[in-house]
Amino acid sequence: MDQAALIAELEQAVRDRRATSDIVRRLAEPGGSAAPGLVAVLGTVSPSAMWSVRDALHLIGPAGFDAAVEARTRAEEVPDSWELGHVLRGFDERCIPRYTAALSHPMKDIRHQALGGLENLGEAAAGTLTDVIPFLDDRAGHNRYQAERTVRAIGANAAPTLRGIRRDGPAHLRRYALTALAVVGGMDQFDERDRRALERLVRIKTAHDTAPDSLPDHCWLAVPGAAYEGLFEAMGLHDPVPCTISMGLSAMDNDTAAVVDPDGTEHTAYRVFVTPELDGWRLIYADTALGSMFWDMDELLSRLSAACGQAQYYCQDEHSDSMIWSVALNGVPRRRYWRNEIPEWRGEPMDWEEPLTDDPDYDHAPNATMECDVNSTAYYISVDPDQVEPTTTLRGHGWLALTRPGVGHGAFTGVVHF
């Protein structure tokens, strides 16, 4: 049966997995000679049949890869570019040399798809590491992001190779290897020279960085930037490493790690992000730890404020209509508002708060004021994350730290974006 007849049969068998699998095998049987025809129909068949044509090309292997690259090279924009992208990212280990060659292709989309294909191969693509890591500094942001995903997929087992590059070269790869070590969690095994190099790298990136167009405003702490160093001991944090804002925010996407002691005891460790100084304040994000009340908040604020002079806690949840802000000064809780708690207000109003009403007949708590909104309170007394913008004064770099000693940053999954 010829290719056109098989594809017509495929369109009729889309709900029959066994029949579809058999047709895919028969489409791939002729090998490389079948590949151009299969590529040509990718954008013309039904979506369900397209996935089967893709699978046939993947079975063919290198010749299928070559045909897909040739088709994608026709123009920067082709009607079936989406389908070709899915084909290019899915080849097996037979195509690793072709993926490596495609990383030097003049068309940026083919380079991007090659990085995606190597990500899908994971540890099997470890031999391509030296070709992948230069993309960690690629001008195209989507390629940088994809390169980070690929390095992460290759895994922490890449760390020895990366440390070897840091130690022995080649020289032109050393700075990329440093970034890759941070991505795979190899920071735990940095020597002192590499730790200093990472700090320089983060400082360089931060020096050319500006504050983002806002920061998360669901839950955070704030301390004065001039005295922030005391927060690490006050919060019981360990292994701080320098980071950019992008690194810190991406680390919050995977901020929890399960830890098992040698005796089998299980623990949970959390990752905490301390921002660079923003208009004189450092914000502290510990999303899961704060959400699960890993700390007693009053006690934590007391310790933080004793170490830093002042500490503030903010939390809001639109789903439950919860709203909390709290301030401690020099080790003593000073003022708190907690919507839906009894009492809602604690402590005497601060100088900047506006009284709720002067009407003596209005029944309200004597210490209640108008200041119940989290964002406006933060804006008034420190920094509102939602109002952070590129014009916000940014100083220094941020930090990533852990709530348990000896865990290491490598215990946390997910991509850390520079």
Image (cartoon, rainbow, N blue to C red):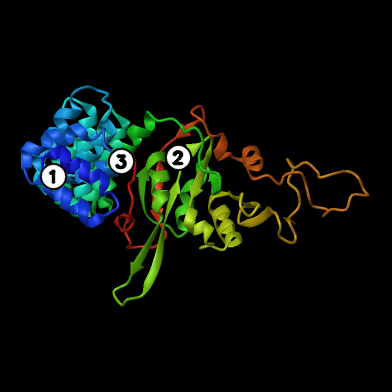
Give the left or right position of residue 135, taking residue 359 as reference: left
Q: Residue at x 54, y 46 (%)?
A: 223
Q: Amino acid at mark 3?
A: Pro
Q: Residue at x 48, y 57 (%)?
A: 288
Query: Neighbour class for label 1 at 10 Å: few (<14), some, many (≥20)?
Result: many
The first of marks 3 and 2 along the sequence is 3
Q: Nearer the viewer, residue 99 or 355?
A: 99
Q: CA distance from mark 2 to mark 1?
A: 57 Å
Give the left or right position of residue 152, taking residue 317 as reference: left
Q: Extreme right residue here?
A: 361
The first of marks 3 and 1 along the sequence is 1
Foreground: disc 3 or disc 2: 3
Foreground: disc 2 or disc 1: 1
The first of marks 2 and 1 along the sequence is 1
Q: Which mark is residue 331?
A: none
Q: Residue at x 61, y 60 (%)?
A: 298
Q: Are marks 2 and 1 in contact (CB under 8 Å)?
A: no
Q: Which residue is mark 2?
A: 276
Q: Which mark is residue 47?
A: 3
Query: Neighbour class for label 2 at 10 Å: few (<14), some, many (≥20)?
Result: many
Residue 47 rendering spot, x and y as whole percentages: 30, 41
Residue 266 rendering spot, x and y as whole percentages: 37, 72
Q: Nearer the viewer, residue 91 or 308?
A: 91
Task: Tell me: residue 102, above or below residue 57.
Answer: above
Q: Amino acid at mark 2?
A: Pro
Q: Which mark is residue 27?
A: 1
Q: Is residue 60 visible?
A: yes
Residue 326 rendering spot, x and y as whole percentages: 64, 52
Q: Nearer the viewer, residue 354 or 306?
A: 354
